[in-house]
Image (cartoon, helix red, strand yellow):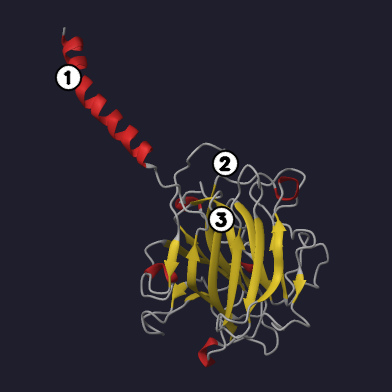
Amino acid sequence: MACAAWGTAPAHAAISITETDADSLRYATTPGWTIEGTRLQNGYSPWQSHLTAPGIDASGDGWLRLTGGDRLWQAGMAVYNTAFSSTEGLQITFDYASYDATVAGRDADGLSFYLLDGSTPTSSLAVGGNLGYQPKELSPGVTNGYAAIALDEWAGCGAAHPNPCINSDRVFIYGTGNPPPASFTPFRQLPSSGVSLSGTAVGKVAPVDRINDHARTVRITISPVSPATPYPTVTVEIDPTGTGTGFVKLIDAYTLTEALNGPVPATFKMGFGASTGATGNTHEVRIRSAKTLKALPVPTLEQNALGALAVLLALLTLPALRRRFRD
């Protein structure tokens, strides 16, 4: 992964998405996103994540359907193709819905919001497996993953979990993968990052039936990095009412140190993922807002003047240089 270097300016753009933008995933097209899907076991039907507008919902009121409740062993992803600097941070607020389980009471597996190394080209993106991020069955996991905030419905068991098979109805953070430092288990659950929803106002990850206006709202804040604060922190809040006014803080400023999660990339790309297994569920998301937290510096009047002077000097000296080379 390309690491952050202070004093450099990697190619990126500030992010600003609102509900009325096509990139909010509510409309019939999403020009800024790459949307894919895959099957996780041979013998099952291929899957393609898709927008619900305009075929199911009206344009402007649609969702991104990452998985369908009628399909088993599938995974879906959507990656925003605009990279943003890790020095800017990000706050994203989105609604999620999870319903139509193939077996009542066995909603599976869950969904995730994740960050990739921003230098990853679109052509190299891969669909994650477990919760749309980790490896699972036929999926090797996402490409150049840095961290994922996972909403686990059904205990995604595996070696990356410190306590396999007890993680249902939890929010936790997966770490870096592809390639991790040699001392790390790829895509592992980060220590002490798991929070059980049992006993909180949120209660469970699913079922959340948005058809009956029961969608939930998630707000995730990734802090900017700087020489003074070289590692990003992750804060996760969920509003079980879906109104955007009843947030419950579940993870508070969890620090992704280099010793814990490897070097911080210079830029990030953001994405969503979801998966099903032996039981299925419909997983859908749509964005309320997404914004980088620290704007790019605005040039001062002196900087603008110096820039204009440099251009003027170049224009004045160019004819003389041409004559010199002709002579």
**Residue in view at x 66 percent, y 75 percent:** 109
Q: Which residue is labeled 1 in the image? A: 319
Q: Secondary structure at mark 3?
A: loop
Residue 42 visible here: no
Q: Which mark is residue 44?
A: none
Q: Amino acid at mark 2?
A: Ala
Earlier residue among tags 3 and 2: 2
Earlier residue among tags 1 and 2: 2
How packed mark 3 is, by other alpha carbons closer than 10 Å (few <14, some 14-19, many 20 or more), is: many
Observer-nearest residue: 227 or 21? 227
Q: Which residue is labeled 2 in the image? A: 2
Residue 32 percent across, percent down from the top left: 40, 61
Examine the rendered structure and indicate whether residue 188 appears above or below residue 18: above
Observer-nearest residue: 310 or 124? 310
Q: Which residue is labeled 3 in the image? A: 89
User: Which quadrant of the figure contains the N terminus?
Assistant: top right
